[in-house]
Every structure is written in structure tokens, then in C-alpha cells.
Amino acid sequence: MFQMTYKNNKLISNFTDMYTKLLNERIIFLSGEIDDNLSNSIVTQLLLLESYSENKKISMYINSPGGSITSGIAIYDTIQFIKPKVRTFCIGTAASMAAVLLASGAKKNRYSLPNSRIMIHQPLGMFKGQATDIEIQTKEIMYLKKKINKIFSKHTGRDEEEICKDTERDNFMSPKEAKNYGIIDEILL
């Protein structure tokens, strides 16, 4: 059971117990930069919750600036693969890859709090090395750009060309704008 205690007049909480309590309620909290460690943790939680029940929805709360595309794609593919519907909630920020994950929730189950911010853009790349290596990396980033645009198109109902244009630069949205764009279905509160 989750307990909060005071020690030297300071509130102490056991974060392991907090996350365990959330997981027992079928809640996953995706917070911080998306990297391999976070991705592995989220994928594990999704698979664990599916093993407990294939029929009960999973809620994923997102507050993230985004991060690694390949790490995010692992989460995305798992959300699409598992049988339980995944409800997504933006609480704070869902930027870059986190916006992709927000949009990937089950239709009519994608939400945002009213003061959140959602941002979409094209993949970022920082290349160095020999010219041939840079060429290989450029091809890969263009492949990933096309893949992300296809994913957004699938979940928003928008044309890939429109998404390509809209992601040329950082495109910040209010929850109302994200709803109109098709990234979320409902604004809470």
C-alpha cells in the first residue's frame, strides 16, 4: 500500500509504491525524455497489463518533451499490438514523439487537460562523420520522417502532404487546436 510519511518535517513518499499503485489501477505515467530506458519500461508495463486482462482499458498519462524516434516507435508499436484499448491523456506537454504517442491512443479515448501544450514537428538529426556516413544518416532521417507522417495521417485522418507541411517547423497547439487537428478527441475539465 502506498504511504506518505513525514521525516524531519518533510513529506517523504515511496515512489516505487506510487508507481505500483498506479499500475494496479492500469495507469502508466510517461514522463520525461523518451529514450531506450523509458521505452523499455513503458513497453514492459503495457505487456504486463495486457497479461492481467485483455479486456480492460489502459490509461497512459503523458508529460514529455519527446525524444528518440526509435524508442518512441517501440512504445507506439506495442500500443497498436496489444489487445486492451489504450486511453491517452496529455497532462502538461506532449511534444514531438510524445505527441505521436498521444495521437496513437484508441479513437474517442485521447484526451488533454485544458492548459496542456501539444507540439508536432519533423524529426531532428545531428550528423557528423564522413560524407558517406552523413548520407546514410540523412536517408534514415527521411525514412523516419515519412513513417511519422504516415502514423499521424492514420490517427488524425489528415493527408500526409498536409502533415508534412505542418511539421516543417515546430507547430505548437492548444488542446482545442489539437482536437481540431485530430490528435485528441476531448478536452477534460
Image (spheres, rainbow, N blue to C red):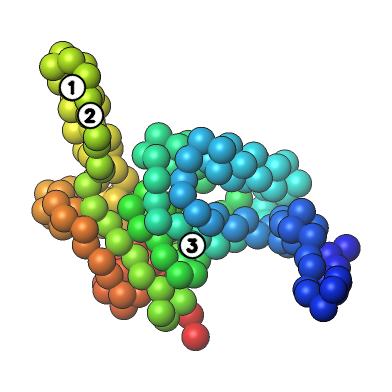
- Which of the two marks, 3 or 1, is nearer to us in this view? 1
Q: Secondary structure at mark 3?
A: strand
Query: Is there CB contact under 8 Å for labels 3 and 1?
Result: no
Q: Nearer the viewer, mark 3 or mark 2?
A: 2
**Nearest to N terminus: mark 1 or mark 2:** 2
Q: Position of residue 147 (x, y in %)?
A: 27, 37
Residue tagged 2: 127
Whether residue 142 sits left or right of residue 4 in the image: it is left
Q: Amino acid at mark 3?
A: Asn
| Circle on res. 63 | 3
Looking at the image, is mark 3 or mark 2 earlier in the sequence? 3
Q: Quadrant of residue 9?
A: bottom right
Q: Indicate the position of residue 181 as horizontal and vertical percent values.
A: 26, 66
Tag 1: Cα neighbours inside 10 Å, few (<14), some, or many (≥20)? some
Instruction: Identify which residue is drawn at 70% across, 42% down.
Output: 48
Q: Secondary structure at mark 1?
A: helix
Q: CA distance from mark 3 to mark 2?
A: 28 Å
**Residue 45 vertical placement versus 185 (above, below):** above
Distance from label 3 to label 1 (Cα)? 32 Å
Which residue was labeled with disc 1?
Answer: 134
Q: For mark 2, does the 10 Å Cα neighbourhood hold few (<14), some (14 to 19), or many (20 or more) residues?
A: few
Evaluate whether residue 108 shows in this view.
Answer: no
Apparent side of residue 8 relative to residue 104 in the rendered image (left or right): right
Q: Please give the name of the residue rendered at 49% of the width and 69% of the height, measured from the top-left corner.
A: 91
Mark 3: give few (<14), some (14-19) or many (20+) Cα within 10 Å. many
Q: Secondary structure at mark 2?
A: loop
Q: Residue at x 40, y 61 (%)?
A: 94
